[in-house]
Image (cartoon, rainbow, N blue to C red):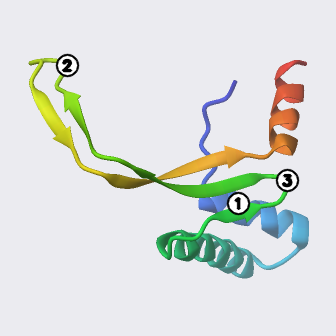
Amino acid sequence: MGSKTVTRADLSDAVHREVGLSRHESAELVEAVLDMISDKLVAGESVKLSSFGSFLLRDKTGRVGRNPKTGEEVPIEPRRVLVFKPSQVLKDRVDAALSK
């Protein structure tokens, strides 16, 4: 498997090739979509992209952790975390690609 990370530039190039917008318009479109997703998450809302997956916010409770090196107990504060839950369509597509 390749270890290449997909960047914003890669996404805007794909939009440029597939949709036919100019490179500048493609980059603006990708930025607008990512900004909208970010804004909704910051506002505490979940984001669902049909046939792709959902970005969800989860509240984690505080707990006592342990420093593995020293064994010292350390309190871990409650926090909100971002999780991604892939759709069944995406899972099936990835499974099919990996089973070839």
Viewer-side residue, 75 vs 100: 75
Please tell me whether mark 1 sits on a helix, a strand or a loop: helix
Crowd band around label 3 with a 10 angstrom C-alpha radius: few (<14), some (14–19), many (20+) = few
* Mark 1 Cα shell of 10 Å, populated few (<14), some (14-19), many (≥20): some
Quickly name the residue at label 3. 51
Gap between marks 3 and 1 measured at Cα: 18 Å
What is the quadrant of residue 63 in the picture? top left
- Residue at (28% x, 45% y) in the render: 62
Other-residue count near label 2 (Cα within 10 Å), few / some / many at <14 / 14–19 / ≥20:
few
Please name the residue shown 62% across and 38% down the image. 4
Q: Position of residue 30 (x, y in %)?
A: 68, 71
In percent of width and height, residue 67 lies at: 16, 25
The disc, 3 or 1, on the residue closer to the chain's N-terminal end is 1
| Amino acid carrying mark 2 in the image | Pro
- The percent position of residue 93, horizontal first and vertical second, equals 87, 36
Q: Nearer the viewer, residue 72 or 11?
A: 72
Examine the image and state in which quarter residue 1 appears: top right
